Amino acid sequence: MVREAGRHSKTRQSIPFDPVGDPFGGRVGSERAIQAGRSSGDSRFHRGTNQSGMRDYNERLVLTLVRQHGSLAKTEIARVTGLSAQTISVIMRGLEEDGLLVRGAPLRGKVGQPSIPMSLNPDGACFLGLKLGRRSADLVLIDFLGRVRAMLHHPYPYPRPEETIGFVRKGIAEMRSGLSGEQDRRIGGLGIAIPFELWNWADAAGAPRDVMDAWRKTDIRAVLAAELPFPVYLQNDATAACNAELVFGKAGDLNDFVYYYIGAFAGGGIAINGSVFAGQTGNAGALGSMPVAGEAGKPVQLIDVASIAVLERALNADGRDASHLWTSPEDWGDLGEALDQWIAAAAGALAFATLAASSVIDFEAAVVDGWMPLEIRARLVAAIRGEIAKLDTEGLRLPEIREGTVGHHARALGGASLPLSERFLIGAASLSGAS
């Protein structure tokens, strides 16, 4: 897929990708399909088109509906999309021949021909996702259903470009060595979820400035794209996590929500009309920079209050080792008063940020996920509900405060969701450039 660089080269810059040898024929996820998806209106269930030249979009429409419902017969898809039964038959036959759909057992008992449900083929495609964070990197391989087939974790005190790229090279080679030739040929791409302008976080990350400055000169997407036989995508890490919630999560009833991912630093994204909205530069929903009330009412940024790095500093100040915060997100043990104080402060800041965001867009919900044990996420969400109830909400409709459904690996899975969304789904904005 070849994409032209737009005005905002920060996220739209691209290097041509030659689709020759692509098992998907370079058809699904073309630029034409993406543009068609953008112009399809704001209906959650998009209508198809019978016009020639639009099969790419219609294929993505069918794959999206089957993903949402688990399995569907062609008569049901025709009813939802408004496409003719003949058009749907041709599309589904083509997707089955491409190995993207598989037939289920015929459903009998109704008048006429038995209905044959079609579902996604788990081996139809696979995707790689990289999360590059301030304290660790994760590399994941998922199948077409989003199930994790392999995952590698690489902790560090701070990310060094060469070390991190070396981890990715070695990890991808290891994962690909475990695939058959056909499976390897069906890798749909690598998605990189990375904080934008990583070099600006040297002080907050406690990293040497010269090490972080090296990222200013490192285009990790271009480096890896030059070595890999499939396209490479890149997006802000928290925005990618928001996309994971849409693609893999259980927020299917939500169209519009503000999303927070609480990692070493707090960040987020926004979903509008069932799609992640990345904005002109890819940095829409930069919630870590949202002004919130600090001590004595002085404004500070959300990142300075709700980040796990704040909890880490509090534990270190008490003389306690906090390294397990980054290596054991399933269980932090007993952190005592330091955790209680962090939850209280973070909840207050997140409540303030949610109220401010709701004055711009009437979100249905605020979804909170993060690199933390599930019980602590539940405590944080409950505390946010309590704090937002104390604020002046006159003239506003409060969104529902919900826990995320993907979990602490949402950023890595979000990275893997980038090539999946760009090439096989509708409803996701054009999240990233491809190399």
Image (cartoon, rainbow, N blue to C red):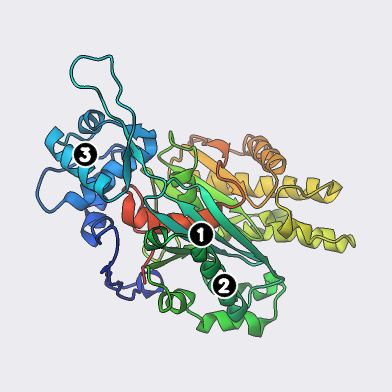
Q: Which residue is at a point 63% across and 36% down the rendered structure image?
A: 385
Q: Position of residue 291 (x, y in %)?
A: 58, 57
Answer yes or no: is residue 268 visible. Answer: no
Q: Which residue is mark 2?
A: 170
Name which of mark 3 and mark 1 comes first in the sequence: 3
Please, what is the three-letter code of the amino acid marked with disc 2? Lys
Q: Residue 211: which quarter of the image?
A: bottom right
Determine crowd level at label 3: few under 14, some 14-19, many 20+ residues with C-alpha closer than 10 A.
Answer: some
Indicate which disc, 1 or 2, sits on the residue closer to the N terminus: 2
Direction front: furthest residue: 180
Tag 2: Cα neighbours inside 10 Å, few (<14), some, or many (≥20)? few
* Residue 323 in view: yes
Q: In front here: 151 or 321?
A: 151
Q: Nearer the viewer, residue 103 or 290?
A: 103
The dot on residue 161 is none
**Which residue is drawn at the image coordinates 75% and 50% (left, top)?**
342
Residue where numbered disc 3 is placed:
47
Q: Dot 1 corresponds to which residue?
A: 286
Residue 412 lies, in percent from the top left, at 54, 57
